[in-house]
Structure formats: structure tokens, C-alpha cells
Amino acid sequence: MSSTIEERLLDFLRQASYRPVKPKVLARQLSIGSEDYGEFRQTIKTMIRRGLIEIGNKNTVRLAQSRSRLLGVYRQTRKGDGWVTPRPGQGSPPGDIHIGQRFTSDAARGDVVLVEVIKPPRSTRAAEGRINEIVERASSHFVGTYFTTGHEGFVRVDGNAFHEPIYVGDPGAKGAKQGDKVVFEMLRFPSPDMTGEGVLTEVLGPRGAPGVDLLAVVRQFHLPDTFSSQALDEARAQARLFDEQPVDPNRVDLTGTTIVTIDPVDARDFDDAISLSRDDKGFWNLGVHIADVASFVPQGSVLDAEARERGTSVYLPGRVIPMLPELISNGLASLQEGKTRYVKSAFIEFDAEGRITNTRFSNSVIKVTRRFAYEQVMEFFESSDDLADSIPPEIRELLTHMRELAAIRRERRRRRGMLELSMPDCELQYDDEGRVVDAHYAPQDEAHQIIEEFMVTANEAVAQHLGDLNISILRRVHEKPDPLKLKAFAEFLRSLDIKIEEYQSRFELQRVLAEVKDRPERHAVNYALLRSLKEAVYSPDEEGHFALASDSYCHFTSPIRRYPDLVVHRLLQQLLETGKSGSDYSELVVLGEHCSFTERRAEKAERELVKIKLLSHLADRVGQEMDFVITGVEEFGLFAQGVVLPAEGLIHIRTLTDDFYQLDRATHSLVGMQRGQRYRLGDQVRGVIVNVDLEQRELDLRLAGNTSPRRRRTTSPKRSPKPLPKKGRGKGRKRK
């Protein structure tokens, strides 16, 4: 709770409208009740000690005037030094703060730390700092490879979180063998003066054995992967209560309506279905039917508590860790073809030009007429006669209408300023033994866009409807970007000779994306803009969704795999049953932060396992040349991602032997000081795979033709590659 109070307090004090008040008044303004006031007072004392806030005239609370001490997130490099990314809004120096090895204390990757700036940034150097305090540990449990030296056991931690092995006691603890993947708890974090020490808690199996890498990622990110017996018992009880016949008289009977689902070919949980009709005047009636998960997951039940703890399903390569037991996620709630299923229906009516004229909601019962994969729909659109002949006329008409309305709605959204970043997902293909045999970028085809458009429309309609009734809901918020970041983005565009006027206008950003769509610079522009935008989060605050150009937005369409959607369903159910609804704002704040955290955790776990799979695939390709696009530019080198095969690695600056290179931050470039050769974000280069390190999870590259490395001093040899694209699963992977 204290970290939540701290974040709320900092956000409140940073508001331009804030005027210093005494702690009791501040507590009332933050809606902190008497039961939490003691913790609130303690949080204030801790923040004063850390230099974040101070007590001013008449015992009033204000932000500390000194900006030399900042909160941020730490990451370590291979050489033992590190970097801190300050939390926004602290008046921090531009960019990350470099932490020399002797100033790192015992911080570990992901820890929230209090850093003191000891040297301000200069034009060619980042700010320097020292870590004064570890505010919050990211984790105390780690995964790595076990080995012995003499009569002592050690673990080499996966990734580059620690640059030295961790001592774990006598050999053979927990039955661990040389080369096993293990989990251990850190008893003493390593520091410049002390070796880290831990104790083994679990042996996962031999390194490289089938399934061990997946289990290692599950443990590394603390993903709950089993359900309690109580939760499973509750799911079985719900299954016994459910009866497909007769149709529930309290629901709208849509079992005779033509309804389809469109999903990835390998999908098992189907949570959305579509119906659509058009009258003689050209008016549309769209039905978006979403699995009524709330009917099977009673609020306050053990099943509900475990779904809330998970927050989301996790789609790992080779395994899905569901938010709900499969009896519900793949059974009772899943909208399977030909099965009677309960749904919450959003009926949205449009005029001929795609303007919404009416919205209504109901508890319904449906029977999906036909299940399609995205590929089948694209075949139909591309006039496959064989497929068309196998589809009944009413379904062909439905698909055609869906295509027409989605195009109309998408064009209206473009006119509103929707941003369409071209950042394709990664798809992996496996052999029968689960090994990766191919990897490629997922297609961004029209079938995906149709479903995405209808889901966005339904999400927006629900948020608008509940918002009009002044009902507090858990929204999907994407705040406007930081003007300073957009200014830097505009400067980068000008370095590419791309004109931009009002860089804070989404319409201008949209124009730029359209302008570079078919140009070589499109990679650079898309990556740079993505880094200029904020992350979307869950919050009850009505901040809108910047990228979607939406004033009011929430998640409603995926309650099988996202807990925020289930929360919105329950609010809608209250409204349908009683005509009124509501939820406690403070509870929604806490829930939003939790669900935002579980979403990021799932994304990181997915990226990490995709990275491992890709590196394993590339391990036998050392020496092979590939085309790459530069996705990151740092003082120590270039991050580059394959143009065809979506793997990312580092071209270290020491391998650029034809010149001495320096970082030009304004143009995201490394520039040769003598010859003027420039390597810029988004440039395509020819690279060679030099080394694959599965334990450190690193891919080393060099430019084709640079074969005689010459070492040179660099400020930062850190290894913190930008994330790989996550595994594509159609609409299931879109997190707008």
C-alpha cells in the first residue's frame, strides 16, 4: 500500500494546481481514510528522508526543491556498472544516469533505487550518480545454471542481471547436477565488496532439455502456473450448473442469428463473435458478442481471487498460462461453433456514413454459426472460388458487410487522428519436438484489421455509455506524450529531411507515418515514435487513449484472458440488473496498477522466451550473413534486428574498425570522426552473426566487412537490448 500512496502523493504534488497544505488536509484531498492514515504519515516521513518531499512554511507538504536525489529503476551491465532510468516528473537530468561500479551498492536489475546525481550531464556524456538506497527489490528469487568449483556450488544467473556467479553452498543441494537449471533465493545481494549468496529452492532440469527453458522463464517472472484445488472445484461446480438447454428466458435468444468468430488458426479460447445486418436505407446494426465470463466467476470467490492475481493470460511459445482454468476458458465461456453460449452483447447502430446513432447492451445467448481462421477470411476476400462455394450465402453476405463497415469505421478513425504504427509481431514455427524451424513477422492483413476495428468500437461504446452515466470504471488509458520527447522526435525527423510543423499534433504525427509508409526510413520513424509515446495503462482516470484518438476507452472484449475486462462486465451487469452501477475509485486505482503490472510482466516473459527460442535457432548459424535494420543507437554500439528473421543483437562499437565513432544523440546516430560514415536508427545494414550466448541471452553481430576488431574505450558497455517483438496471435496479442 505504501508504494501506492507514495506514487499517488508524488503525482498529486506535481500538479500545477497544487498548493502546499498540511498532511491532514493532503490526506483528505487524496481520499485516504483513517485506517490508512498511519501508513500515510509513515510514507511522508520516508519520502522526506529520501529527499523526495519536504515540509515548508506552516508545516505544509511540498516537493523537495533539491533535484539531486531521484527515484529510478536500475539495470546492470556486463562489466558491473549500471544505469538508472529516473521516474518521470522529478526534474531529472535528460536521459539515464550512469552508475559507476563502485557506486552501485548491492542493486540488482529492476530494483527501484534512490540515486544521487554527482555529475550533471554534458553534451557527450550522461549524468553520473551513486545509489544511496535500495527502495524496493524487483525480486529475491532468480533462475540460472548450476555448476560446482571444488567443493562449492554456484549459479550463473540467466541474462546479465549479475556479472559474477552466486554462491549457493555445498555441492549437490536439492539434488542439483552440473549444468542443471535451478531456482534460488538470494540471501545476500552481490555488491562491489561482497559476493552474492543464495540458497537453492528448486531444480528445473538439465539445461537444454525439452520444456526446461519454458519453465525457467515461468519461474524467472514468477508467473502463477497452477490453480488451487478450491479454484478447480469451483470451476467444476460451474460446469455442473451450466445447461445448454433450454435457453435461459432472462437472456435475449440469438441462437438463430448468423454469427461468426474469426481467430488465429491455433486458438482455443474464443471470447468474441460478430453479427451484422444492413437495412434498405444503408444503416448498420453491429452485434459484438463477448463471452459472459462473469456468469461463471462469482465476484469474491477463490476462482475470482486467483484470476485477479494473474491479471491476464500469458501466451508463451509452446504454452498458454490461462487466467482462468481451461474448463472455463476453453470450455464453458469459449464461443465454440455450434455450442450454446452465454454472452454480453453490445448492439451498435450506425448510419450509412459510419456514425454511431444508438448503442444498447443485453445478456444474450448465441450459437456460433461458423468459426473462421484469419487466413480463411483472407482467402475469401481474395476470391477463392473453392472456399466461397463452401460458405452459405448468408455467411458470405455477413463477411462482405463486415469488410465494408470496418473500412468505413477505420477511415473515420483515421480522420480523428488515429496513429497506425507499423510494428509487426513475431511468429515462430516448430517441428514435432518443439524446436524452432522458422521465424517471421506476422502479417498485418485486412482480416485482423476488421476484428480489431470492431473490438475497438465495442470497447469505446461501453466506456462512453458507462461514462455518460458517471459510473467509475477501470479504463484503458494512453496519455498524451511528453512534449519534450515529441520535440526530440521532431528533431530526429528533420535530420532525415522529413518536415514536421506542429509536432504535438496527432494529425501531424499521423501524416508523417503515412508519408514514410513506403520509404526506407519507415523503420526509423516507427521505432523513434514508439519510444516517444507513453505506455497504455489501466486507471479509473478519464485521460483518453492518445493512439486511438479516443476520448473514452476501456477493455471489454476479452474477459477470458484479461481481468480488467471482467471488472467492466460486472459493472455492466449491475447496470442491466438494477439500472445503476458503481465502484470505489480508490479500489480501481489499486486494481489498475496491479493489472498494469501483470500485463507488463506477461509481455516481458513472452519476449524473453521468444528471445531464447530465436537464439537457440541461431546457435548453429554463426558466421551467417543477414540483413538487419538498426533499432537502437547507443554510445557502445548499435542494436540491429533482422529484416526477415526477427532476432535482435548488438553490433559493438569496438567492431567498427574503419573509424572512431561517437554518438550523435540528436540524430540517433553513430558518426565516424574522420570519414564521416554514419549509422542511424532505421538504417538497413548487412550483418554477420558472431556469437550466440544462451545463458546471457545475447546475440553478438558485426557489420559485414569489419573483420579485424580494434578495442577502444567506451563509456557504456551495457547490454540491455530493446525487446524482441512478441509472439503474434492475431487479435489476442493486440493490447491497445
Image (tube, rainbow, N blue to C red):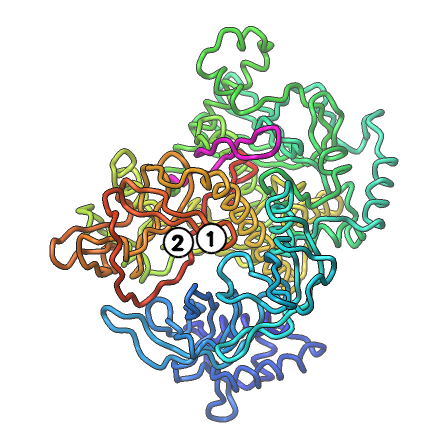
**Looking at numbered disc 2 in the image, what kind of residue is underneath it?**
Leu
Residue 55 horizontal/vertical position (percent) = 49, 89
The range drawn in magenta is 422-441
Query: Do residues under tags 2 and 1 come within 8 Å of each other at their CB atoms?
Result: yes
Q: Residue furthest bottom?
A: 58
Residue 473 horizontal/vertical position (percent) = 61, 53
Q: Residues within 10 Å of mark 1 (few under 14, many from 20)?
A: many
Q: Which residue is mark 2?
A: 533
Q: Is residue 357 visible?
A: no
Q: Quadrant of residue 683?
A: top left
Q: CA distance from mark 2 to mark 1?
A: 9 Å
Q: Is residue 234 visible?
A: yes
Is 578 situated left or right of 259 in this image? right
Which residue is rendered at x = 84% and y = 36% of the image? Answer: 239
Residue 621 horizontal/vertical position (percent) = 41, 38
Q: Quadrant of the N terminus?
A: bottom right
Which residue is rendered at x = 71% and y = 23% of the image? Answer: 367
Residue 426 among those drawn in magenta: yes
Residue 354 versus residue 553 in the image, above or below: above
Q: What secondary structure is found at the residue carrying circle 1? A: loop
- Closer-to-camera residue (425/687): 687
Q: Earlier in the sequence, mark 2 or mark 1?
A: 1
- Closer-to-camera residue (619/11): 619
The dot on residue 72 is: none
Which residue is rendered at x = 71% and y = 26% of the image? Answer: 366
- Closer-to-camera residue (606/451): 606
Q: Which residue is mark 1?
A: 478
Q: Residue furthest front?
A: 150
Q: Residues within 10 Å of mark 2 (few under 14, many from 20)?
A: some
**Looking at numbered disc 1 in the image, what kind of residue is underneath it?**
His
Mark 2 or mark 1: which is in front? Answer: 2
